[in-house]
Image: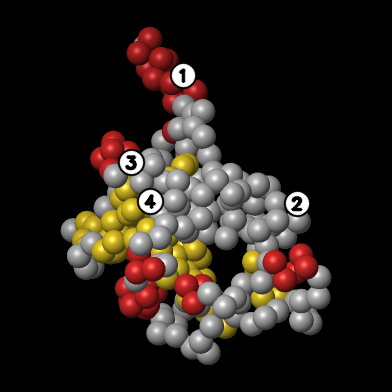
């Protein structure tokens, strides 16, 4: 009787620590970094079958924030007292995140019919200003940008690495926390992978195009980004691939 009471007490104290991947998720991109200060990542696309998670292809290289990783705001509980992502910290958010929604410069792309795609125009903004009520939102103006603030938030730039982007739902609407990090995407890497990012996950253009073509919104695709040690520690409890 005492043991049962103790067990119930522990469950009531630590309910938020229990977590596993949602049962309706059958597609997952797993990113593994060597440690919390690494800006390099190994990426693998998995799909869930009746016999469990299976890799769709061999792993491929990507780049992360130049300062490494830090716990983000996704669907998983973060460790008690953990430092979490802040705007401008140059770290990629770690954890488990929904993914979906593609933005690009081309009129159309190769993708699943159910995957939302928007061709970016000069009127598309992605708000990175923590003081704005539209922080971490895509805002579409009904006119050309006029103010310096609007121009600073523009998605369409002369930089080709931003020509194709898949959204990673870190600190995402409708529950956005000011200054907790914004504009986190998969996109094309810089200098053939020689340069790190400000917090996004990047890769070779052809691999990004292939990955996007495989994403199926009906399978609730997720992105799991962890260090090697944390992945091994959490793999069984979180039911990771």
Gap between marks 4 and 2, in whole Å? 28 Å
Disc 1: CA contacts within 10 A as few (<14), some (14-19) or many (>=20): few
Residues tagged 2 and 3 counted as in contact (Cβ below 8 A) = no
- Residue 181: give x, y in percent of width and height: 59, 50
Q: Kindly identify the residue that appears in the image at 72 percent across and 60 percent down.
A: 134
Residue that badge 4 annotates: 39
Sequence-first disc among 1 and 3: 1
Reply above or below: 5 against 234.
above
Mark drawn on residue 131: 2
Camera-side mark, 1 or 3 = 3
Disc 4: CA contacts within 10 A as few (<14), some (14-19) or many (>=20): many
Camera-side mark, 4 or 2 = 4
- Residue 48: give x, y in percent of width and height: 27, 61
Camera-side mark, 4 or 1 = 4
- Residue 138: give x, y in percent of width and height: 65, 68
Camera-side mark, 2 or 1 = 2
> From the viewer's perspective, is 146 left or right of 60?
right
Mark drawn on residue 35: 3
Residue that badge 1 annotates: 9
Sequence-first disc among 4 and 1: 1
Secondary element at tag 2: loop
User: Front-most of 8 and 135?
Assistant: 135
Gap between marks 1 and 3, in whole Å? 34 Å
Q: Kindly identify the residue that appears in the image at 29 percent across and 44 percent down.
A: 34
């Amino acid at each position: 009787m005492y043991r049962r009471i103790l067990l119930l007490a522990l469950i009531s104290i630590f309910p938020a620590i229990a977590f596993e991947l949602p049962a309706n998720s059958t597609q997952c991109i797993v990113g593994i970094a060597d440690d919390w200060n690494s800006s390099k990542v190994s990426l693998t696309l998995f799909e869930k079958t009746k016999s469990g998670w299976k890799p769709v292809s061999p792993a491929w290289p990507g780049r992360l924030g130049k300062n490494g990783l830090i716990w983000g705001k996704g669907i998983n509980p973060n460790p008690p007292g953990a430092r979490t992502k802040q705007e401008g910290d140059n770290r990629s958010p770690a954890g488990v995140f929904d993914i979906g929604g593609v933005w690009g410069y081309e009129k159309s792309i190769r993708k699943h019919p159910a995957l939302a795609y928007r061709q970016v125009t000069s009127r598309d903004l992605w708000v990175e200003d923590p003081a704005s009520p539209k922080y971490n939102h895509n805002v579409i103006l009904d006119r050309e940008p006029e103010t310096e603030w609007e121009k600073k938030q523009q998605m369409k730039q002369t930089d080709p690495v931003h020509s194709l982007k898949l959204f990673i739902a870190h600190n995402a609407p409708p529950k956005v926390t000011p200054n907790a990090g914004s504009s986190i995407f998969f996109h094309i890497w810089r200098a053939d992978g020689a340069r790190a990012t400000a917090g996004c996950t990047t890769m070779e253009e052809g691999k990004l195009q292939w990955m996007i073509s495989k994403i199926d919104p009906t399978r609730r695709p997720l992105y799991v980004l962890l260090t090697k040690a944390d992945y091994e520690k959490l793999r069984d409890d979180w039911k990771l691939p």
